[in-house]
Amino acid sequence: MNIAISCLTLQLDNIGGLQYRLKNLIEGFCERGHTVKIVQSPFAYKGSRLFYEKVEEYKVEPIIIPHNINKKIKPMDLLRMYNYKVFDILDKYHIDILDTYDPYIRIPKKHIPMIYSTNYFLPYIYNQIYYGGFKNSFFHILKVICEQVTIINSDSIIVENKNQKNWLNKWMNISNTKINVILPGYDENMVHAVNKSGFNSNVNEETRIIFVGRITYLKGVFELLDAFNNVNKSSKNHKLFYVGDGPDKKKLETIAKKRGISENVKFIGERSQVETIKIINQSDIVVLPSYNEGVPLSIIESMALKKPIIASDVGGISAHLIEDLVNGILIKPKNVKQLEKALRLVCTDPEVRIKFGLNSWKKAKNLTNMKMVNDTLQVYEAVYRKSYKI
């Protein structure tokens, strides 16, 4: 198949779960003999050049729509893109199927078979507004408005967790046959190689707590620092590591310095996927107290590395990954007391860490990259056969 993937506003050089998912999917598609093209605006392409270098051996071709956005995207830019005739361009490339990761594509009556891959919907926006405020949610609201039309007109939909499927089925009356739940997958070869190194985090003199993700208040990074600060008062034998970058990093560093805990709180910046997995393997506890999540790849990778998890009970985390007090602890977003209590329990009890870690590994064994690629291709092939009546 000649596959097009639409990322009109997504800059693929930004390290995150979605970027890794796309990279792994593209590599998997190409290794199975398919060709891949990526549809982007100039703005998105400008921030994706390193990504194209990573998949250079697969000869992935960008399709740049002539809609010039080179700086920060504004609401009117999204509306202009929505009205742009993307399908007219795709016809020239003889695309067999389009998988779009953004809803800013107006779908004509006659169109190339299209799948919409998403982790948004109104429940996501509700959490975004409730915990993050209306002012910081405007773009997300605009996205959901466009998304409702895209969902109805798509040939098939891929979601990250069963909660999203249930919501689409119940509130939008979308048929179950149109919705496919495909979880992210970890790179089994990479994880196996790190595991094979024989590193045992239990020999650490200190308890290492790790956060992996974009350093923004929406990820609960300030609540994590507050909870750690309280735990640190009774024991200095713990270290907190923030892996990633983001708009609130400097503010977080300043707060840690003012509280006198800079020696125990380390900011190690963005790392490659391999480096991140190695860092996770050297930790004792992985924490993700986000206000919103789909199904985080960092949590799946941590589970595959036998790590105990403390995470917010949002999105697909409790639906697919974490069972409370079995392989981790679930907390409410923005609840510092719950987070502190969870940290104290897991930090002070090595047996709990071992138990949670083993149970994490059992739950993650089948959440592999290969399964994600195979499941996605099955959706593509089913839509293609149905559209062309093969």
Image (tube, helix red, strand yellow):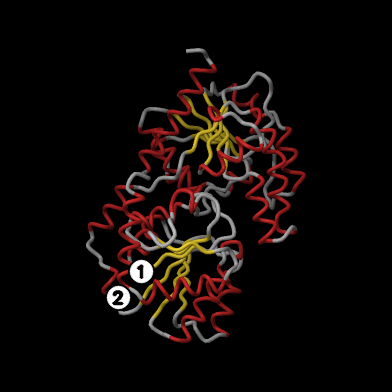
**Looking at the image, which residue is at 51% across and 23% down?**
383
Left or right: where does residue 266 sit relative to residue 336? left
Q: Residues within 10 Å of mark 2 (few under 14, many from 20)?
A: few
Residue 171 is situated, as x and y percent measured from the top left of the image, at 66, 38
Q: Secondary structure at mark 1?
A: loop
Any part of residue 245 in sight: no
Q: CA distance from mark 1 to mark 2?
A: 9 Å
Residue 90 vs 351, above or below: the answer is above
Could you tell me the amino acid type at mark 1? Asp
**Looking at the image, which residue is at 36% across and 50% down?**
364
Residue 39 vs 264, above or below: the answer is above
Could you tell me the amino acid type at mark 2? Asn
Determine which residue is flagged by label 1. Answer: 284
Viewer-side residue, 40 vs 215: 215
Determine which residue is flagged by label 2. Answer: 204
Viewer-side residue, 60 vs 83: 83
Left or right: where does residue 222 sit relative to residue 231? right
Q: Secondary structure at mark 2?
A: loop
Residue 385 is situated, as x and y percent measured from the top left of the image, at 48, 18
Which is nearer the N-term, disc 1 or disc 2? 2
Contact (CB < 8 A) between labels 1 and 2?
yes
Left or right: where does residue 134 sit relative to residue 376? right
Residue 214: quarter of image = bottom right
Residue 185: quarter of image = top left
Quadrant including the N terminus: top left
Any part of residue 383 in sight: yes
